[in-house]
Image (cartoon, grey):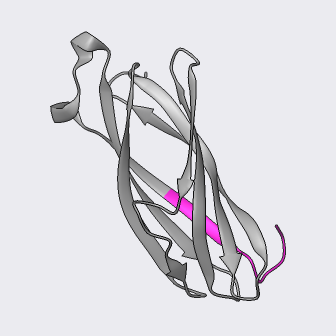
């Protein structure tokens, strides 16, 4: 959305969790820390999430739910909300993407796009 009132930017940092993974059982655990920054002109509440998780074999899992980690944070204009979560995949490499459904203070609902990002065991990509 190009309306300056509704500008949400999302950045993600990922980490492989070796201690929670079981490679011999095709179980690879990853953590991700998400920062949701409100670059718009109005406060906005994060109502729900939609994730599309694709493993290295092309298997797709979709996750939908209210808020993030049990919260529906209100993010003031110029402010950020950061949280961490995780996922488990059957392959060493995969990706995630999705969107947050937002509600601006003026009652307008809009989506904040989460660009694709990679999950990868260190050393698994050349």
Q: Where is residue 40? Give x, y as percent.
A: 69, 82
Image-quadrant location for residue 110: bottom right
Residues rendered magenta in the picture: 1-11
**Which residue occupies 44% across, 69% down?**
71
Which quarter of the rendering shows the C terminus? Answer: top left
In the image: residue 78, left or right of residue 19: right
Which quarter of the rendering shows the N terminus? Answer: bottom right
Q: Is residue 108 above or below residue 91?
A: below
Taking the view exactly as shown, the residue that stands out farthest to the top is 24
**Which residue occupies 50% across, 19% down?**
56
In the image: residue 24, left or right of residue 117: left
Q: Is residue 102 visible?
A: yes
Number of numbered callouts drawn = 0
Q: Is residue 115 visible?
A: no
Q: Is residue 1 above or below residue 126?
A: below
- What main secondary structure does the magenta stretch of the protein show? loop
**Which residue occupies 53% across, 68% down?**
36
- Tell whether position 30 is magenta: no
Image-quadrant location for residue 22: top left
**Which residue occupies 41% across, 63% down?**
70
């Amino acid at each position: 959305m190009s309306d300056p009132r509704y500008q949400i930017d999302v950045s993600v940092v990922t980490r492989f969790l070796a201690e929670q993974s079981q490679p011999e059982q095709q179980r690879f655990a990853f953590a991700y820390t998400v920062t949701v920054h409100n670059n718009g002109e109005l406060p906005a509440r994060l109502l729900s999430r939609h994730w599309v998780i694709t493993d290295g074999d092309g298997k797709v899992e979709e996750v939908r739910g209210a808020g993030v980690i049990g919260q529906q944070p209100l993010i003031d204009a110029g402010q950020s909300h950061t949280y961490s979560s995780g996922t488990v995949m059957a392959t060493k490499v995969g990706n995630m993407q999705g969107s947050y459904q937002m509600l601006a203070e003026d009652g307008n609902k809009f989506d904040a796009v989460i660009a694709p990002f990679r999950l990868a065991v260190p050393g698994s990509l050349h």
